[in-house]
Each structure stands twice: as C-alpha cells, then as structure tokens.
Amino acid sequence: MPYHALDYYRLDEQLTEEERMIRDAVRSWVSDRVIPKIDEAFRDHFFPQEWIPEMAELGLFGPTLPEEYGGAGIGDIAYGLAMQELERGDSGIRSFASVQSALVMYPIYTWGSEEQKRNLLPKLARAELIGAFGLTEPDAGSDPGSMLTTATKVDGGYRLNGAKMWITNSTIADILVVWAKLDGVVNGFLVEKGADGLTCPETTGKWSLRASVTGEIVMQDVFVPEEMRMPDANGLKCPLMCLNQARYGITWGVLGAAQACFDSSLQYALSRPQWGKPIAGFQAVQEKLVHMATEITKGQLLCYRLGQMKQNGTSSFRQVSMAKGNNCRVALEIARIARDIHGANGITDEYPIMRHMMNLESVYTYEGTDTMHTLIVGSDLTGLEAYKG
Amino acid sequence: MNIAVLVKLVPDTAAMIRLNGDKSGIETRDLNWVLNPYDEYAAEEALALVEKHGGEVTAVACGGDDQVEALRKVVAMGANNAVLVKREGEYDQLASAKAIANAIKDRGFDLIFTGYRTTDDDSTAIGPMVASLLELPCVTEVNKLEVGDGTLTAERNIEGGSEVLEASMPCVITAQKGLNEPRYPKLKGIMMAKKKQIETVDAEAGDIRTATTTMDYPPERPAGKIVGEGVEAVPELVRLLREEAKVIE
C-alpha cells in the first residue's frame, strides 16, 4: 500500500525545493529499504546493520554540519523532515540517526578540539565510526546533575569510574561521548571501544525500540588520554544542549510515526465494511480520524515554526520542550486511536500500529520525560521551578 | 561519453488525482510532484555509464519553470549539466519532441535516454519522436543495456519472451523498469544541485496540432455477482471464471 503523507495545511508550499527533495529522498529510501524489513527486525529484536552504510551514503549523519567536517550543510527544517521520514519507518532507526548526529557529532563539533573534529567527524559522517552518548545513570535520570560518574586527573589524562544506562548503540559503538564529573564539574570525554575497564552489556527484555540496540556503559578505572577530553565541554549545560538538539529531531520524528498510524487508519477505515458500508462512513470513526489529522497538522505547524526559529538562532530550549512534549503526547494518542480503528487487526504486525505505539512509549520518556517538559514550560510561564526537590 | 537524459516532473504516482471543474485537465493544487519514475531508470543508466566510461550527463526537460525541479533532481543524483527547454502553455507530444530535438541536436550526444513512458498522461511518444526528428535509431522499453565502442546491445521484453537488438550510436534508449536500481539523491548532492546554474533555451516547436478536449474518471466498477452458495455453486463459478471473466483456462 503506497504511503500518503498528510499535508492538510499545505506546508509543502512553505518548504524550499531542497527541503522537499531531501524529504522525498529519505521517504523513498524508507519505503524501499526500511518498511519491507522492519517488522522482522522488531520481532526478532535486531538492528539491520546494512542500513548503516546506506544512511551514511544518503548523508543522514551530521547533515547540518559544514561539508569540511563531513556534513551537507542542510538547514534545521530539512533535518527535521529527514527525521520525520525515518521515524515514519521506525523510531529505532530515527534514534540511530539522532544519536549519531545530535548526541555525538554535535558535541564534538561544538566543544571538541580542532583535531578531534578533523579526525572524528568525517568518519562519524561516513559511519566508519559508530557513536553513543552516555549521560543517564541508574540513579540519575531527570536529574542528571546528580550523576555519580567521576573523572580523576592522572598523568597524561583521566581515570573514569561509573555506570551509564539506557544508552542507544552502546554495544556497537566505537566511540562513546561520556559525561563525568571532574572536580565536581560535568565534563565531556571521548571513550574508545576496547579501553581497559570498559564494558557495555546489552539491555534485554525491551518491549519497545526492539529494532534498536540499547545497553549500559560500565567504567572501572578507564583511562582517557588528555587529547580525548572535549576541551570546551564544561558544565551540565553541555549535555543538556545535546539533548535539546535531539529533542528537536524528535518533535519532527514522532509526527512521522503518527502519520504512519493515521495513513493506515484512513485506508483501513475506507476498506473495512460493516453494515454494508466502509466504517469510515460512520460518525464515530470520522471523529477519530479528524482528531488524528488535526493533531498531526497542529504538530506540523509547531515543528515548522520551531524549525524557522532554530534556523534563525532564536529558538529557546523551552520552546523545544513544548514541542517535544506535545508531539510525543499526540503521537502516542494517535497510535492508540489507530489501534482502536483497526479493531482486532490493529494488534497484529500486518499493520504498523502496535510497533509504533510500543516505540512511542520510549520516545515519550527519553530525552526528557513528558512531565519534565511540562515543568520546564511551567517554570518559564510562572517563574516558579516546580521540578527541583 | 556525452549523454542526455530527457526528464519530466509528474504528479506523485501515489497521489489521488482529481479533475478540475470543467474536466479539461487535472486539479494540480494539492499534488506532490516527483520525477517521472521511468526517467529515474534513464538517469541512473546514464550516470552509471559515465562513471564507468567517463564523460558528462546533461539533464533536459521541456516545460515551464516548474520543470526545473525535475532537472535539479537529476543533478542531485549526479548529472553534470541541466537544460530547460522553456515553453509557454501546453504543447502536444510532437511540439514537445520538436522543441527537445531542436535544443539538443547540435550538442553531440552519444546516447539519449528517457523513460519509456511518463506516468502522468501515459505518453510513450517523446523518445521515439525525438529519435525520428534527429534521424537516430531508437530502442524502446529497454531493461538491459551493454554499451560498446560505437554500438550497443539492448534487451527488451516482448509478449511471451525477450528480444535483443544491436544498434549504432548515437541512439535513443527508452528505459523500462528493471534496467537498474536508481540511486537516491544524496543530501550533499541536493545541496549542490541547489547552486547549479540551469541553462535555459527557448523552445522552437512549430504548430500545436492536437489538444486535450476533456478528461473523465474511469467508469465505476459494476457490483459483484453472487452465483450461489456452498459447494453446489462451484461448477457455475468455475464456468463463469473460465468463459466470462477468462481468468482461468
């Protein structure tokens, strides 16, 4: 069944030619390569590795960075559209791109030394190196400032001790961006695979993001040479700025998942007869379809305006929080309504609904929980912080 | 090797097509436009040949400024040059073919590729017409191609089998599905295509001799027929499938 994207408010007319071309290129790749394979990958719990060089070839890793560092110099709106198309395929594959681009390449580009940038960014863009990002810990989730991972200065570098969890790609990563406290201040380190004292066990038993690898990062006296500390990555604001980049991609991404659910629902409702007519002809079903379409359209407008502000350099992390919170919330709601419209069929993998729904449960929570995003906007509106102890 | 690819921007093949008010054409307002899918095979073949043998690929489109998007897509895939044969208003197939032939005749192309049909109006005429106007050989609906020194070998499907032809170059080839796997434009290629200068030439086409008068939707499918119930109905069902629907033998 061909995919029909929803564009009720003709956002396409606002997009530039290259934004549409980038969106269409990623959409075609997802239709041809991801959709035929994704159910098997999700069911059997693996990330199809052959997608990695193909995504690199398309230019999906670090695409907003300048060409001299391996990027394509695309704008934030084009980047968002690419994330939307990837997540129309699956949240796991969008997560892979988000981590490589927003959580690994972005901090190296922003706070790395010129040597780190020249050495690492082109390889990360070509996916010769896979990256991961270690911030969250067993006892430090929404409050990352309470992290226990430490770095101690030693001759020629640092010793890192601590454990990170819920780390996308940690088990397959060649280079880990690890945040650790050095003399009480959060610093960013580039830890290489195979370092003594480093282990990355896989997290098993997930009912979500099954086509994506998740693991831990456990460090016991791991030595990191001085040249692998990002010299300008000082303070908790740095990892939070990384998350802000990733959240921006998520605001677009989840609308891709929501649109996949809506498109499947509309086609199903038009082709499923009961009492002699398609169920789409019943008021109760139309109300659901209209609600889904309205929320997707509102989400698109939120994304587009946020993208404009991000491109102008005028967006704030609070505005990103509003969009990330809202769009994840509506995407999850849309997936659940889609399941309802599909009736019993909605629980099978003949339709993408349950896969997206289960994925969105993670996306709703990672990169800042729904509650945290609400309270970030709440503190901005009222001037009163309601999330600190 | 100097290769031209003739391309056209068409409505997305997944789009729901609606006719305009007086049924003189289609409603274009809400459509998403794509490169004609068969032109993608044409472009891929041209780009792969140039990668192997060296040379340049020039994308050529005939139409208004909207066709620049088709050209940019081929440039984003890797084409070196792009030419818009600019026309005002609607052309028929012969006028379009003449405009294209006039624009490319002195450019020394060794090969001219195009999709074997366009998915918008289902036309298969442009490739063969351009070949005739330029007095070049033409092989249509090609799904396999070997290019040698001044000659080529092309394979095409025919009813119940396949046909292999040899032709001298220059030659016009129209591409059928199966010829290759078109590449995806890379993000870098798309950003480069944006900066590419598109050469514009005015169309020289002569008279327009055909015009579309009306368009209409396909007739509604008649309701299904229930021939009976249970096992007893099977012989009649088989008879109807064989004799009326002619779907079994």
Image (cartoon, rainbow, N blue to C red):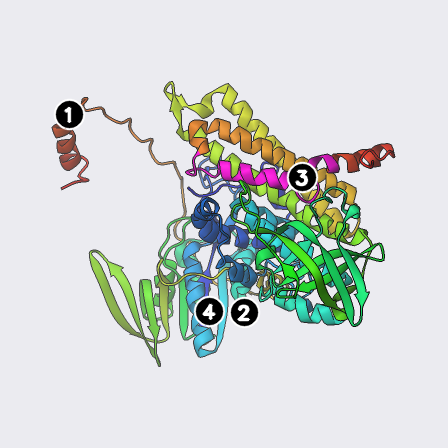
Identify the magenta region.
A348-372
Pointer 3 and pointer 2 on the same chain: no
Q: CA distance from mark 3 to mark 4?
A: 38 Å
Disc 4 versus disc 2: nearer the observer: 4
Pointer 4 and pointer 2 on the same chain: yes
Q: Which of the numbered marks, if any, corresponds to residue A301?
A: 3
Q: Amino acid at mark 3?
A: Leu
Residue tagged by mark 2? B81
Disc 3 versus disc 2: nearer the observer: 3
Which element is circle 4 on?
helix
* Left or right position of A278 against A64: left
Residue closer to the observer: A109 or A2: A109
Q: CA distance from mark 1 to mark 4?
A: 58 Å
Q: CA distance from mark 2 to mark 1?
A: 66 Å
* Left or right position of B96 against A310: left
Q: CA distance from mark 3 to mark 2?
A: 36 Å
Circle 2 crowding by C-alpha within 10 Å: few under 14, some 14–19, many from 20: many
Q: Amino acid at mark 4?
A: Leu
Disc 2 versus disc 1: nearer the observer: 1
Among numbered discs 4 and 2, the one appearing first in the sequence: 4
Magenta stretch holds residue A364: yes
Residue tagged by mark 4? B47
Residue closer to the observer: A255 or B227: A255
Residue tagged by mark 1? B231
Pointer 1 and pointer 3 on the same chain: no
Tell whether label 3 touches label 1 (CB within 8 Å): no
Which element is circle 1 on?
helix
Report the chain holding disc 1: B
Q: CA distance from mark 4 to mark 2?
A: 12 Å
